[in-house]
């Protein structure tokens, strides 16, 4: 099975120039750095101990920022390497004042490329986030006797069924993992059947609040201070129209109402503007930096990494990928800013999180436009954010202790 996997990857590599060209045209790749995916490095590996974090996209990278800041201050760590697969995630790191940390795009999972990658960067520990499971890289890491952690592990029912079809192959992959830390009970039960070397529960990393706010949060608050604001975040096709119709309904009783839409994919902005125009709603883009918001209906955020700016000023956040596309998005960052969460019926990817928020009376499931408009509030719930903050601190401490155990073991070997 592993041989077949390598053959398929070889074929992909052969046609990759065409694939990359198309993705560059669609602004899904950085044309100056795309060769990093073939392990053609753009930065030098500094001397000393290097720890490596890998997360697929924005959410995974944001979840490890508190850990990165801890190790930025740790004198025994000389360098931190962060890899990710998406263009948006690479840009996120530019917003933080990180001195030891460098970013590279994650390489193609071909055995020859992964060997080259590990031989060059020589991490003392490899920490993969969420559902990032790569057969060739895991095999290479194990062969080099580098501790491999699957942190905040998440395996859905659908993903588990795929893995279990090839049980021997999947067990051989998961057996490369030194320790897996599931973010929920469902994942824990699946991991027991997939058999990593160790399974330990620490809690969900996304309960940890990142206290490093973006600049100009207060200025944004001043900009919106005379308006009633609510946010529709991580929206997908169809959900923007749904929220816009709720805006129209709510506008009948609420003056100075502004709906902030933060699409999951900002390349859809022109499509969203067109949809809003058909509803006779006046829109403005965040990038325009317009100061006068009088008579604005829809404020579209078309920049990376600015969601929490709006979570801070809004009392209600609708989380997308829960109405038209199943799965849901993680609501914890918004809740950290004391926002009430509204979501559709499809949140299977974060069942444990939404169950907790429901028990705290911090979220509400809706099915139609009337229910959405009815449940939009303009008053923050500070108690909820404080409870999550306390939980997050405990999880962060436990996580650091676990990682440090592996780092200490590596020191003893050298």
Image (spheres, rainbow, N blue to C red):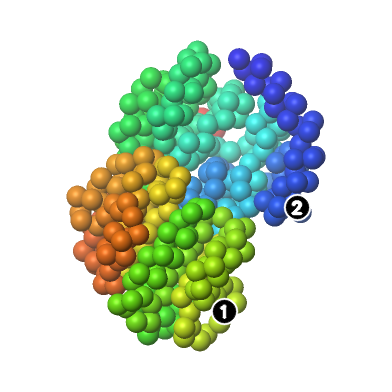
Seen as rendered, the residue at the extreme top is 168
The residue at 33%/26% (across/down) is 189
Quadrant containing the C terminus in the rendered view = top right
Secondary structure at badge 2 equals: helix
The residue at 37%/35% (across/down) is 182
Residue 12 x %, y %: 73, 30
- Cβ–Cβ below 8 Å for labels 1 and 2? no
The residue at 48%/40% (across/down) is 129
Closest to the observer, 401 or 217? 217
Residue 274 versus residue 7 in the image, above or below: below
Seen in the image, is 266 located left or right of residue 299? right
Seen in the image, is 103 located left or right of residue 358? right
Which numbered tag is attached to residue 25? 2
Closest to the observer, 238 or 407? 238
Residue 346 versus residue 219 in the image, above or below: above
Seen in the image, is 223 located left or right of residue 34? left
The residue at 42%/42% (across/down) is 326
Local crowd size for mark 1, using a 10 Å CA cut-off: few (<14), some (14–19), many (≥20): few
Residue 227 figure quarter: bottom left
Residue 221 x %, y %: 41, 79
Disc 1 from disc 2: Cα separation: 27 Å
Q: Which residue corresponds to mark 1?
A: 289
Q: Earlier in the sequence, mark 1 or mark 2?
A: 2
The answer to whether one can see residue 313 in this image is: no
């Amino acid at each position: 099975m592993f041989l077949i996997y390598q053959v398929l990857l070889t074929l992909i590599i052969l046609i990759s120039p065409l694939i990359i060209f198309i993705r560059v045209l669609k602004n899904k790749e950085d044309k100056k750095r795309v060769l990093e995916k073939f392990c053609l490095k753009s930065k030098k590996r500094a001397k000393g101990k290097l720890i490596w974090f890998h997360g697929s996209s924005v959410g995974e990278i944001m979840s490890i920022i508190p850990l990165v800041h801890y190790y930025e201050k740790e004198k025994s760590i000389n360098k931190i390497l962060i890899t990710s697969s998406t263009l948006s995630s690479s840009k996120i790191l530019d917003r933080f004042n990180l001195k030891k940390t460098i970013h590279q795009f994650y390489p193609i999972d071909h055995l020859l490329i992964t060997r080259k990658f590990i031989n060059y960067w020589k991490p003392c520990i490899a920490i993969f986030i969420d559902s990032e499971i790569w057969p060739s890289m895991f095999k290479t890491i194990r062969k080099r006797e580098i501790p491999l952690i699957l942190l905040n592990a998440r395996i859905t029912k659908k993903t588990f069924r795929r893995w279990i079809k090839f049980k021997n192959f999947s067990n051989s992959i998961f057996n490369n993992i030194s320790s897996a830390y599931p973010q929920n009970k469902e994942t824990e039960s699946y991991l027991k059947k997939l058999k990593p070397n160790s399974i330990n529960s620490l809690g969900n990393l996304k309960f940890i609040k990142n206290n490093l706010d973006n600049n100009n949060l207060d200025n944004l608050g001043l900009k919106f201070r005379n308006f009633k604001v609510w946010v529709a975040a991580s929206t997908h096709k169809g959900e923007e129209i749904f929220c816009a119709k709720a805006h129209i309904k709510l506008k009948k009783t609420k003056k100075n109402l502004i709906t902030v839409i933060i699409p999951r994919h900002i390349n859809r902005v022109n499509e969203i503007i067109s949809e809003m125009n058909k509803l006779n709603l006046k829109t403005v883009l965040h990038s325009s930096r317009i100061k006068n918001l009088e008579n604005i209906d829809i404020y579209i955020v078309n920049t990376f990494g600015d969601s929490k700016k709006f979570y801070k000023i809004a009392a209600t956040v609708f989380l997308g990928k829960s109405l038209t596309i199943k799965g849901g998005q993680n609501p914890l960052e918004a809740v950290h800013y004391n926002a009430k969460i509204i979501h559709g019926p499809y949140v299977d990817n974060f069942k444990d999180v939404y169950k907790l928020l429901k028990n705290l009376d911090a979220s509400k499931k809706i099915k139609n436009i009337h229910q959405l408009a009815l449940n939009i509030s303009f008053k923050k719930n500070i108690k909820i954010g404080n409870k999550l903050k306390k939980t997050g601190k405990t999880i962060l401490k436990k996580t650091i202790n676990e990682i440090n155990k592996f780092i200490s073991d590596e020191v003893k070997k050298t």
